Image (cartoon, rainbow, N blue to C red):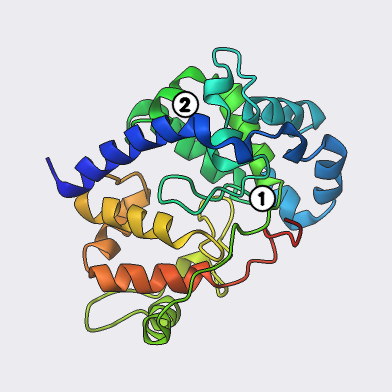
Amino acid sequence: MTEARTKLIVAGIAAAALAPMLTFAQDQSETPRIDALEARLNDERTLFNATLGVQEEDDELFELGRLVAMGGAENGGSGMACITCHGGKGQGDGAGAFPRLAGLPGWYSYKQLNDYASGDRPNEVMSGIAQRLTDREREAVAAYYAAVEAPVVGPMPPADQELLQWGGQLAAVGNAEKGIPACVNCHGPQGTGNPPSVPYLAGQYANYMVYQLELWKEGVRDNDAMDVMSAIASKMTNEDMRAVSEYYYRVHNPLTTSDDG
């Protein structure tokens, strides 16, 4: 068993154990109301970000997504509430297992849920949850989180400036000697993503990004088109992974980040 796979299982077990204790995320009043989502969808980019192209997006879809996020899935319950780990606004908690969902492209999140359900993206916690969601519920909750914004959980820890400089270089131009392409080629000039299929990096938690790069490198995760991320991660050292992750964590993402706490 690879080290990354072992860590994946351990993290899954830890997440399951921690979920009932993460009460900060269980306040349903934190979840945006539908009228707030409608206001957000007046912005063309936000609307495109939340459009999956599977079925027509409407108030009913977003209301269902909000319900699923709060634990109201047809075959679930409070133990399947997204807000338990990811928060009502999709802010996550900064841990490697609980990323930000706020503002992730809807189609991307929908695909990840399908991959969790099929086993193409193995995860001890998410696979079971995704399998119990209906296809409509996966679509709905993906669209819901695509339309919300959230503050970054802080405070942001200090980081070595040389490490951040190296991360910024990898992000902007890559490293020709190692054969590492620039992150901006796919994730955009500011790391804000490229909907519908490429997620943002800017503002995502460093620990989560490091963890995912490790999974790509070990071959535990390989659910992207043409194995691009596996090929890139295989050329990265641990320092490279930490550097680019810490850099992007500190890049402000105005498209998904609110100022309220």
Q: Height in image: 179 above or below 214?
A: below
Q: Residue at x 49, y 70 (%)?
A: 157
Q: Tell me: 127 left or right of 35.
A: left
- Looking at the rendered structure, the kind of residue marked 1 is Asn
Q: Position of residue 34 (x, y in %)?
A: 83, 36
Q: Which residue is mark 2?
A: 130
Q: Is residue 121 visible?
A: no
Q: Is residue 224 visible?
A: yes
Q: Tell me: 196 left or right of 123.
A: right
Q: Height in image: 185 above or below 84?
A: below
Q: Position of residue 246 (x, y in %)?
A: 44, 70
Query: Callout 2: 10 Å neighbours few (<14), some, many (20+)?
Result: many
Residue 161 shows which numbered tag?
A: none
Q: Which residue is mark 1?
A: 49
Q: Residue at x 62, y 40 (%)?
A: 24
Disc 1 is placed on an element classified as helix
Q: Residue at x 78, y 55 (%)?
A: 44
Q: Tell me: 44 left or right of 116.
A: right
